[in-house]
Image: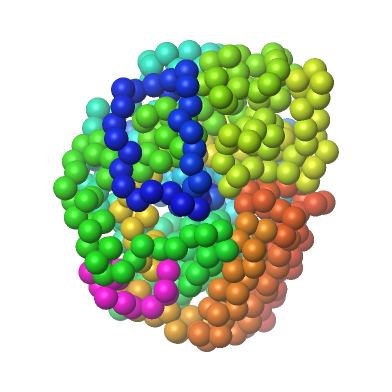
Amino acid sequence: MRFAGNRAHHPVPARPFALASGRAATPGPARRKLAHRKRVGAAAALAALALSLGAPPADASAARHGRPRESYVAVDAVHVLKVGRPTARQVVVLVPGMYGAAGDFRVLARDLARRLPDTQVWSVDRREQSLADLSGFQGADPASYYLDGRYRRPPHMPAEARNWGLATTLGDLRAVVRSASDRGRRRVVLGGHSWGATTALAYAAWDFDGRPGYRDLSGLMLIDGGVHGAFAGEGWEPRNSPDQVRARLAAIDSETGEGKSVIDGYLSQALGLGDRPESAAIWYQLIAWYADRAPHAPSVLAARLPEPLRPPRPVTNAGLLGWFMQASPRTAPALSVHSGSLTDTGDWRDNGMTPLRRVAAAQAGPTPAGFEWYWPQRLSLDLDAVDPYTDTESTRILGLRLWHTRELDIPLYAFETGLDKGTQGTAAHWLTANSRIPGATYAADPTMSHLDPLFAAPTHNELTRTLVPFLRSLRTVADSR
């Protein structure tokens, strides 16, 4: 996920906390991103708590529902949702975009694992997600727990959060890739959605103590994201000149604790859902949770929303999720899906490519969630800086080891929706022309929104239709060696 448009680049002034303030802030034209996305101490302890409270159903439960096997486990400093056979010889590792979490890929991972029995899909939660208190979703009334202020919020951000940028993310991701590889016994394909795709490309070109990241991989896959102007079609221009980088870095370094320059709170503020960075994530997960558990019951949340965000008439739980994901003009276009419409009775009618129940199943959690609660500003800065996809003065200021961009020699898959009006495809072709990538698969569906590829029904999903043959081809190539 990511925001783009005309977002201001300075912190939003602090205001008293409210998940729902009764009056929404007017979301001006978005300048930045939504894409679309533990420390080994206190954050790791929170991670363990979240895992113990919210692990997905056991394999036996998944089997009863005809689903591939699933588990949510710790891998070094992060957590990973694993879908599919543990004995699979190929692992697809997926990275969510900005504000995205591992739950974003749950239904897509199930679709891929069903079609490719010898492929397991891993979806990664970044370490900052371990700070989220998801325990309220274990009870029967999560709305009361979160909206009445009883949830456990970290009293302050860890001091090192100011440094949770690309180097930290890629270090954690390398531990996941190595675990997936199982000492070279399994092939690993790395990909991501939106800025998660940018992260995957940064991994491939990164220098890990003399070893290029791409040597850990058998393929790369980009879902509506990339580098070298991939997001230009939605009006995004990275602020990555040396002077801009120094100024942004200084702003981050000057803040401690909950400093607005350390953790990005734009999404909550822009949508009018509260003043804390996690407010929007909590609201979206609550709405999905009730839509997943009791879709046709009268909504328990609509009346508690800020007035400008309420549907025009009484709705069901599913109707409220549909209103937020498609029908509401006040929510973010980058968060929309093509699902259906509200009925006269306020329920939801599925008549689009993306059934609402699949969105609810992915984002309801409880763990993994579909939204990341605390997105570090340093990660935004670093991902802006790697957009030219070469070693620059800005990447050197930030200590980003993007040293192997021209050496990439593994197959590429790139998929784009209508979000960026073709610039992602242009960027993917540039990447192939300016590296040693031996072959590339380019696919697109301009009728899709930014999130449709993650949730659309397989029969209507151009992503799965074209990605499955690509992943099979990697297996065939490897088996012939």
Q: How many marks?
A: 0
Question: For this view, does 413 lie left or right of residue 262?
Answer: right
Q: Position of residue 207 (x, y in %)?
A: 33, 74
Give the extent of the magenta segment. 387-400
Say which residue appears at 58% left-offset and 47% top-offset. Answer: 334
Q: Is residue 46 above or below residue 388?
A: above
Q: Position of residue 359 (x, y in %)?
A: 66, 38
The front one of 38 and 223 is 223
Q: Is residue 369 above or below residue 317?
A: below
Q: Is residue 462 magenta?
A: no
The front one of 325 and 161 is 325
Say which residue appears at 60% left-offset and 44% top-offset. Answer: 333
Say which residue appears at 44% left-offset and 84% top-offset. Answer: 406
The front one of 407 and 422 is 422
Say which residue appears at 63% left-offset and 48% top-offset. Answer: 451
Where is the C terminus found, in terms of image quarters? Answer: bottom right
Q: Is residue 399 magenta?
A: yes
- Is residue 289 at least partly visible in the picture? yes
